[in-house]
Image (cartoon, rainbow, N blue to C red):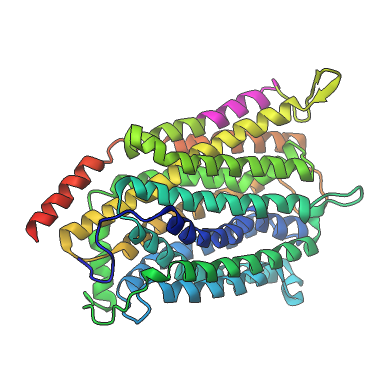
Amino acid sequence: MDASQPPPGPQCSRLRMVGYSVGECANSLLMNSLFGFAMLYYTEALGLSHALAGIAMGVAVFWDAVTDPVMGHITDNTRSRFGRRHPYILLGGVLVVIIYVFLWVVPDFARGSPQALFWYLLVINLLQRTAITVFGVPYVALGFELCSDYDGRVTLQGIRSAMNMLANLLGVALAWSIFFSDNETVRATSLPENYVRMGLGFAVVSLACIVFVVFATRSQIADNRRLPVTQHGLRGFHRDMKEIVGDFYPRYVFAFMVIVTVGIALVSSLQMYLYEHFMKFGGYEKTIAHGGSMVGFGLGSLAGGLLVRRLEKKGTVLFAGLLSIGSNFALAGLFLTGALVPGQTTDVLGWPFPYAFVVFVLLHATYWLGNGVIFPTATSMMADVAEINELRTGVNKDGAYAAIFSFALKCAISIGVLLSGFILTRIGFKTGAGLEQAPATVWTLCGVTLLAGPAISLCSLGLIRYYPVDKGLLVRLRAEAAGRT
């Protein structure tokens, strides 16, 4: 066993879990604002085509995915007085924040032509995604090591996911009201200065969260300079990746998460356009709708630990997937058929009750509640199979397993983002500030968002049925490993 990490034993406290999870607030503010507003910023405020914006953002996500396994190998084999995770968490976190600012503060030379703007967006996204890799892979690996309990791992990942949604709710969702409240003459999402103010505010808060998590997890820092390195260089990297990709235990989790994440990323990329153009929400309505999705995701994340105790991890993600997909299908059935119309009200005691809005918010939140159960539960599955590998080999490769898992997710997100850009172009969405979209285009947008994404996710549920790990198997393998020592 790796001497730099605590052996399986006493569970980590909720306080330690929360302290670690504060780092996810930074990740949430930076990444969710990018996914939620960058496409709008570069297309509606700066005039870049949806296809070019989708290419620039999708390629950057793919680059992020490709570099994750490299970072996983590097962090697993780092030997320093501050351990293998913390130096990268701090350095990568600071770089992420600095580069993030320039995503919104676009210099004049980049605004001179669509080509210049496209290359600027591509380069700045590539730089930011590289920094995200340096920060994110060691951060997730640290979470694998913080808690060794089968059920506790779900709780830890659930708290981390809930913190993500809390920051998303208090930051990104409220941004609609704080930075993007429309007035009578101009649509707020067409003004570049609104995005700049939002970006600067989120950068300051994110930097504070990154510094805090390094301090809060300082007890995990251990001088590991005397530990042997398994193998440096390309040969060692290739050997580790081959071992993990060939590992029987995680393959169904990888396949499941790739497919389900493509569908979720597609919905996430398009739902802002759904708020804006189909539902025609105002600033406060967008805040409630977007915030409701975050509350749903956060509640789902916290509920995952309770569900696992009853349904095991495989049963939990199957249940959550069906709940999520069914909610969006229900929304499609109501709004695409005209059974409900955006803005529809019903009279309640002489007061116009916004019936359509309330139904949309509740079902939309339920869609994200199901997803909130899926992601932390699947992440804890990867922590389990990483431990199984360590029990079998005696070598800690949490960073590599976290990196391959991240690689799979980011490849899926890249595909989802690319699809969203091409779909918007294909259905005839116009680019530029203040343009009205054709009714047929808006109706098609609603159909794609509410049906295509969940349909893709539905295809994933058959795969996770074959996942072989449960609590009993892990306990048995631990006992066998203890018997060999």
Q: Quarter of the image holding residue 204?
A: bottom right
- Looking at the image, the residue that sits furthest to the right is 185
Q: Quarter of the image holding residue 100?
A: bottom right
In magenta, the rendered stretch is 326-339
Q: Nearer the viewer, residue 122 or 355?
A: 355
Residue drawn 11% across the image and 51% down it: 480
Marks counted in the figure total 0
- What percent of the width, then of the height, locates residue 148? 30, 55
- What percent of the width, then of the height, locates residue 176? 74, 50
User: In the picture, which quadrant includes the C terminus?
Assistant: bottom left
Q: Quarter of the image holding residue 242?
A: bottom left
In this rendering, position of residue 196 left or right of residue 98 = right
Q: Is residue 328 magenta?
A: yes
User: Is residue 427 visible in the rendered structure shown here?
Assistant: no
Q: Examine the rendered structure and indicate whether residue 452 appears above or below residue 400.
A: above
In this rendering, position of residue 318 left or right of residue 90 = left
Q: Nearer the viewer, residue 297 or 16?
A: 16
- What percent of the width, then of the height, locates residue 422? 60, 49
User: In the picture, which quadrant includes the N terminus?
Assistant: bottom left
Q: Name the chief secondary structure element in magenta.
A: helix
Residue drawn 67% across the image and 22% down it: 337
- What percent of the width, then of the height, locates residue 195? 74, 61
User: Is residue 439 visible in the rendered structure shown here?
Assistant: yes
- Looking at the image, the residue that sits furthest to the left is 484
Residue drawn 75% across the image and 59% down it: 47
Q: Nearer the viewer, residue 50 or 402?
A: 402
Residue drawn 45% across the image and 35% down it: 321
Q: Is residue 139 magenta?
A: no
